[in-house]
Image: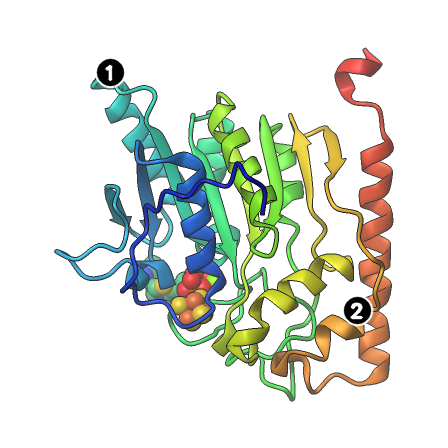
Amino acid sequence: MNCNYPHEEHMTSGHLACQACGGAMIMRHCLKALGEDTVCVIPASCWTIIAGNWPYNALKIPVLHTAFETAGAASSGVKAALDIKGRNKTNVLAFAGDGGTFDIGLQSLSGATERNEDIIYVCYDNEAYMNTGIQRSSATPEGAWTTTSPESMPKQGPKKNIIQILCAHKIPYCATANVAWPDDLIRKVKKAAETRGTSFIHVFSPCPPGWKIPSEQSIEVARLAVHTKVFPLYEVFNGEEYHINIEPKNLPVENYLKLQGRFAHLNVEEIKKIQNRVDYEWKVLLQRSMMESFQLVM
Ligand SMILES: Cc1ncc(C[n+]2csc(CCOP(=O)(O)OP(=O)(O)O)c2C)c(N)n1
Ligand code: SF4
Ligand SMILES: [Mg+2]
């Protein structure tokens, strides 16, 4: 860990997350990056529970709990209210799950992004609706077991590419991040705070009960997601200019899948199909990262 690692804590012990919850670690690091002058907007998700019941709050900053589909709209409103009060330096952090981002909250996020609201939107992606019992979302990867995609018919079709959707809005800054690279996550959240307009960070977030992994393997699984190219780490500026941040070790995707009970039913052919898709998506990302940006071409 580098010496610039912020040691202040804005999240307390006694929160209600499961052991080794990626979402809890991500919030802790986001707040280290942003500091205490931050308002957090949390739609219905595991984090509604993790923060604790009023009057208790595991976060030392103000929190607005809001309806499942409203993170984009509610954080736009909080930002406008703070501006009226002259507090235009206060960070507004929308912190939402994959269900609240990829599915029911997509229209609200799209509206905020299209208006270029000055907010930081972090999606902690545990690839299912964990708070209500591991139902599949459009972020659930192909082949995964969930309680609504049983082993006899696991999730069909690929995970939705949320970064591409945000890039289509020409968002000033968006990035992927991973709880196994806290320095990189903190740098990206700081970058988002410096950016005027909407920033979006899509963070890989292991969930031990939902993924059927032992809690001590949470970070190992997160690391393998990057080194197998399942979840590459990159940034995109203005929806056009791609920078890949970590060179993957190019490990076979099977190394990642075999650690997780949610993929235990997959056969050799199915794993090969997932590998082919991962290889294809990586090639597309590499090509994008080599393209000249729009401004340079002009
Ligand atoms: C309109 C509406 N439908 C359903 C729910 C029930 N609900 C609460 S949290 C949740 C799942 C949230 O999933 P996600 O956003 O991925 O966050 P996670 O629980 O995985 O952290 C659901 C379906 C709700 N609160 N509001
Ligand atoms: S169910 Fe998963 S996402 Fe929810 S608190 Fe537990 S580990 Fe975290
Ligand atoms: Mg989720």
Q: 94 or 115: nearer the eye?
A: 94
Q: Position of residue 275 (x, y in %)?
A: 83, 67
Q: Quadrant of residue 17?
A: bottom left
> Furthest residue to the left?
55
The residue depicted at 67 percent of the width and 61 percent of the height is 223
Q: Residue furthest top?
A: 298
Q: Which residue is mark 2?
A: 253
Q: Is residue 140 above or below residue 124?
A: below
Secondary structure under badge 1? Answer: loop
Say which quarter of the image contains residue 185.
top right
Where disc 2 sits, the SS reads helix
The residue at 58%/42% (across/down) is 2
Mark 1 touching mark 2, by CB under 8 A?
no
Rendered-image quarter of ligand 1: bottom left
Location of residue 130 by image quarter: bottom left
- Residue at left offset 57%, top offset 61%: 138
Badge number at residue 86: 1
Q: Position of residue 269 (x, y in %)?
A: 86, 80
On the question of residue 255 being in view, the answer is yes
